[in-house]
Image (cartoon, rainbow, N blue to C red):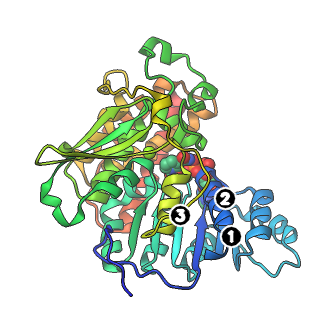
Amino acid sequence: MAVTAPHIAGVAFEPELAARRVTILGSTGSVGKNTVELIESAGSGYVVEALTANSNVTLLAQQARRLRPRFVAIADPTKYEALRSALDGSGIQVGSGPEAVTEAAQRPADWVMAAIVGAAGLGATLAAIRRGAVVALANKETLVCAGPLMMAEVTRHRATLLPVDSEHNAIFQVFDFDNRDAIDRIILTASGGPFRQLDRAGMAGVTPAQAIAHPTWEMGQKISVDSATMMNKGLEIIEAHHLFGMPPEKIEVLLHPQSVVHSLVAYVDGSVLAQLGAPDMRTPIAYTLAWPQRLAFAGRRLDLAALGTLTFEPPDEQRFPALRLAREALQSGGGAPTILNAANEIAVEGFIAGRIGFLDIAGAVEEVLAQVPVGTFATLEDVLETDAIARRFARKVIERI
Ligand code: NAD
Ligand code: MG
C-alpha cells in the first residue's frame, strides 16, 4: 500500500515490506559512522549494497566485514591493493577511483546516504538521484554548488531528497508541503560555533585545533571549521533555498548556543513550529533511515528541565562576514554559489594546513567571488568548469597571503 508523506520532489515513497537496501557514500566519516552504527543496531531491517570512502582502508574494510555489502569503493586509487587484500576471501567486490564511488551510487539500493564532504560528492550524489532513489542528503556542498541542476534532476527522475543536516531535517519535519502559501518564513538556528563571543582581533590568532573543537556537535574537520566561521550557516541558507523553494529574504538565521531547537517554520497566522532534540546527529539520520516510519534507538535524550534555559540572539554579520558572502552569492545566482563553495573548500584546507589564518578564510572567499566571472549557468559541465576555475584562483589567492 502506498504511503503518502511529505517529500521534496512531489513523489511519495512506497516502503517495501522487505528489508531496505542501503548504500552509504562516505561511510568512514562522522555522518557515515553514525549511519553504520544505526544500521547495525537496527538489525534485520536493512541490507547493505555498497560502502565508499576516500582513503581510510582500515575502517572501510572493518565496516565491510561487519555489514557484508556487495561492493566497496575507495576513491584514492593508490589504496586499491590494500583494500583488496584486507577483504580477501570475503566475496565482497572492490573498486577504486572516483568512478568506482559513482558506481557504488548507481547500484540498486532503495536508500542512499550522501555523506561525502564537499563538491567531490556531486557525481555520486547525482548518480543516486538519477536512479530515482531515496537520497538522505548530508553533503550540503553539492546543493550549494549545483542546486538548480540537482533539484531539476530530483524532479525528472522522481527521486526523493531527505535532508540530514539537522536544521533542514527539523524544517522538513514541520514544513507543511501541502500549504506552502501559509509559510511566512523559515528560521535556521545556529550554535554560533566556538568563537561566538570572540572579537575579530581574538579570531585573528585562533588555531585549527581551536576552530575544530565545536561546543555542541561532534563533526568532521571541514564542517567544524565552517561552523566556526559561520560559513556553515551561509551554506545552509543556500541549501534551504533549494530544498524548500523559499526565497532568500524568507530564510532567517537565529543564534541558539544550546543547539536544542534545531530550526523553525513560521506560518502566516503567527504560529511557529519547531523540532527539538539533543544535539545528536543520529536523530536526523535515523529519521531519514526509517522515513516515513520512525526508528527507535538508544541515543541521547532531551531533558529540558535539566537544561532550564534556552537562549536566542541575532547573528553578527560584521564579525562573521561569511554569512553575508553566502547571502550575496545566493542573490547573484548563476555560478556565484559554486564559486563561494569552491573557494571556501580551498581556504578551509589552507587554514587546516596552517598556511592561512582564520580570518583569511572569508577574506579569500570574498576575493575569489569578486574576481571569478559568474558566467551563464545551466549544465553539469558549467558547474564543474566554474568549480575548477574558482579552485585554481583560490589556490593563487592563498599562496599570496
Ligand atoms: P567527514 O570528513 O567526517 O567524512 C567525509 C567522508 O567523505 C569520509 O567518509 C571520506 O572518506 C569521504 N570523502 C572525503 N573526500 C572524498 C572524495 N574526494 N571522494 C570520495 N569520498 C570522499 O565529514 P562529515 O562531518 O561526516 O560530513 C559529511 C557531509 O555531511 C558534509 O557535507 C557535511 O557538511 C555534512 N554534515 C555533517 C554533519 C556532521 O555532524 N558531521 C552535520 C550536518 C551536515
Ligand atoms: Mg547543520
Secondary element at tag 3: loop
Whether residue 47 can be seen here: no
- Residue that carries the numbered disc 1 in the rendered image: 73
Of marks 3 and 2, the one in the foreground: 3
Residue type of the residue flagged with mark 2: Glu
Residue type of the residue flagged with mark 3: Leu
Q: Find out if the beta carbon at label 3 lies less than 8 Å from the nearest ligand 1 atom.
A: no
Crowding at mark 2 (Cα within 10 Å: few <14, some 14-19, many 20+):
few
**x, y percent for residue 121:** 52, 61
- Residue that carries the numbered disc 3 in the rendered image: 295
Crowding at mark 1 (Cα within 10 Å: few <14, some 14-19, many 20+):
many
User: Please, is residue 307 above or below residue 337 in the view?
Assistant: above
Whether residue 79 can be seen here: yes
Picture disc at residue 194: none
User: Based on the displayed image, in which of its 4 quarters is residue 321 positioned?
Assistant: top left
Cα separation, mark 2 vs mark 1, equals: 19 Å
280 lies left or right of 317: right
**x, y percent for residue 102:** 57, 72
Residue at screen point 80% across, 62% down? 62
Q: Residue furthest front?
A: 305
First reached walking from the N terminus: tag 3 or tag 2: 2
Residue at screen point 46% across, 56% down? 164
Give the camera-side residue of 158 and 363.
158
Residue at screen point 31% across, 22% down? 318
**x, y percent for residue 326:** 32, 40
Q: Find out if the beta carbon at label 2 lies less than 8 Å from the nearest ligand 1 atom.
A: no
Picture disc at residue 37: 2
User: Based on the displayed image, in which of its 4 quarters is residue 71 positioned?
Assistant: bottom right
Q: Residue furthest bottom?
A: 1
Cα separation, mark 3 vs mark 2, equals: 13 Å
